[in-house]
Image (tube, grey):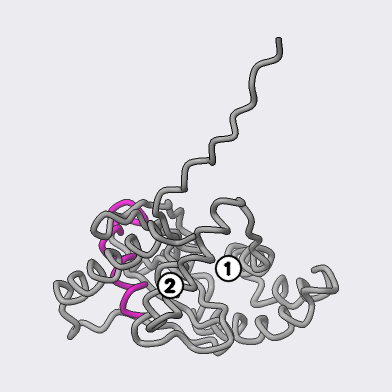
């Protein structure tokens, strides 16, 4: 006799967010928060998702590592699939501006970073920088890249830089977090006047609401 096939529904995925997803969530208000979390949960359940920016990040790293001043970034526009070419034509100029803002590339090198899992209340958030930088003067930076059409909001900046900072012992010890607005070539750093304890309380409340919405999302 064949084994009976179970018709029981699959268990719902546990609440979880990447740094990008959580910062996009805190940037929303009202019903848009629930819609966003519901979409994330469905995406997680179907295991779908695609990152179109991977080749841009590789080209940026190559230009830093080989001190080629933007040659790899310029070439990548002609290498990507035609459907992604308009996106890369938009992103490359600002990325080159950021590369040039690093100054003399002989004084900068890539540093190995590690992903980390931080708990914001009861919500696991994956902290995943795109690259690390080490300067000749001893400074280190863990860099996240912001690719969206709109500049990062104040809420997104606060959340990103704070969550990266609190996990920095795992990500890149001794480094400062940086969020680079790729389309505009602008690097954002932490504001020393911002109180970390206040940001932590705010994010804990956001995480609690995220978890509650996730558990009730259809």
Closer to the camera in the image, 141 or 119: 119
Residue 43 at x, y = what percent?
58, 58
Closer to the camera in the image, 159 or 189: 159
Please tell me which of labels 1 and 2 falls first in the chain.
Answer: 2
**What residue is pinned by disc 2?**
34
Which range is magenta?
A: 157-172
Magenta stretch secondary structure, dominant: helix
Q: Residue at x 52, y 70 (%)?
A: 106
Residue 192 at x, y = what percent?
20, 82
Q: Quadrant of the N terminus?
A: top right
Q: Residue at x 44, y 69 (%)?
A: 143
Circle 1 crowding by C-alpha within 10 Å: few under 14, some 14–19, many from 20: many
Query: Hey, which quadrant is residue 17 in on the image?
Result: bottom left
**What residue is pinned by disc 1?**
64
Outermost residue toward the top? 1
Q: Is residue 188 left or right of residue 49?
A: left
Whether 65 is drawn above or below 124: the answer is below
Judging from the image, what secondary structure is the residue with disc 1 in?
helix
Label ID, residue 169: none
């Amino acid at each position: 006799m064949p084994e009976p096939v179970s018709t029981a529904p699959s268990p719902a995925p546990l609440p979880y967010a990447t740094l990008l997803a959580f910062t996009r969530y805190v940037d929303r208000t009202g019903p848009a928060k629930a819609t966003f979390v519901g979409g994330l949960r469905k995406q997680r359940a179907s295991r779908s998702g695609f990152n179109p920016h991977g080749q841009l990040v590789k080209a940026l790293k190559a230009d830093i590592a080989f001190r080629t001043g933007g040659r790899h970034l310029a070439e990548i526009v002609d290498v990507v699939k035609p459907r992604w070419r308009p996106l890369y034509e938009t992103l490359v100029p600002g990325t080159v501006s950021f590369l040039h803002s690093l100054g003399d590339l002989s004084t900068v090198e890539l540093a190995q970073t590690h992903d980390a899992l931080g708990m914001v209340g009861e919500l696991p958030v994956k902290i995943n920088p795109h690259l690390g930088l080490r300067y000749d003067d001893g400074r280190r930076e863990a860099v996240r890249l912001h690719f969206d059409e709109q500049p990062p909001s104040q809420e997104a900046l606060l959340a990103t830089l704070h969550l990266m900072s609190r996990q920095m012992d795992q990500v890149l010890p001794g480094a400062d977090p940086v969020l680079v607005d790729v389309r505009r070539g602008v690097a954002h750093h932490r504001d020393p006047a911002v109180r970390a304890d206040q940001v932590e309380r705010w994010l804990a409340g956001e995480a609690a609401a995220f978890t509650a919405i996730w558990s009730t999302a259809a």
